[in-house]
Amino acid sequence: MTQVSSARIPLRQIMALLLTAALALSLSVVLTVTSTKEAAASCSASRFNGTWRSSDARLKRIDVWQGEDCHLYARAWSVCENDSSHICSWGNRRMGDSPEPNFQFVGYNWSNADEVLHLRMQDTSHISVWDSTDYHNGRKVSFTVTMYKSL
């Protein structure tokens, strides 16, 4: 009888240890998922988020949103070269990190030029966008567009 009971004690201890490890692992997974969700929710909302529009064909629209990594992303649009009745997307780009909260910029690299949009907040419904394009042949073009936030 002594041999039987001594064989059961290690088995109970092993089972208790495995159960404790399983509970600790599941708790760890729950805490990790919760922390990730809270981290994404803790991104400070940017006043640049939203859709901005202008009447200028060179820069008709800019969509700005916050990614899961808390960085701002933008997609600029202009009137299509081959069809002036439509607007064409320039593609998604991550916006630059600016120390000034009322200023953001986004850069586009084209086959013949590098273009940077400098967005400056005028008020909650208007931004001023300075577009600066440096062509690889040395030519430089810049212009400013006032944009309003779409509802």
Image (spheres, rainbow, N blue to C red):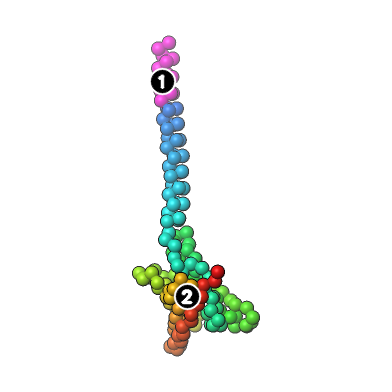
The amino acid type, in three-letter code, at marker 1 is: Ile
Q: Earlier in the sequence, mark 1 or mark 2?
A: 1
Which numbered circle lies on residue 138?
none
> At x 38% / y 69%, what residue is drawn?
101
> At x 44% / y 65%, what residue is drawn?
46
Location of residue 15 by image quarter: top left
Residue 69 seen in this snapshot: yes
- Magenta-span inclusion, residue 7: yes
Measured as percent of width and height from the top left, residue 151 is found at 55, 69
The amino acid type, in three-letter code, at marker 2 is: His
Within-10-Å neighbours for mark 2: few <14, some 14–19, many 20+:
some
Relative to 145, is 68 above or below? Answer: above
Q: Residue extending furthest top? A: 1
Can you identify the residue that label 1 sits on? 9
Relative to 12, is 4 above or below? Answer: above
Q: Residue extending furthest left? A: 99
Measured as percent of width and height from the top left, residue 115 is found at 46, 79
Which segment is the magenta one?
A: 1-13
Relative to 139, is 79 above or below? Answer: above
Q: Is residue 100 left or right of residue 127?
A: left
Secondary structure of residue under mark 2: strand
> At x 46% / y 48%, what residue is drawn?
33
- Magenta-span inclusion, residue 60: no
* Between 71 and 54, the one nearer to me in the picture: 54
Quadrant containing the N terminus in the rendered view: top left
> At x 62% / y 78%, what residue is drawn?
86
Can you identify the residue that label 2 sits on? 126
Quote the CA–CA distance across marks 1 and 2.
74 Å
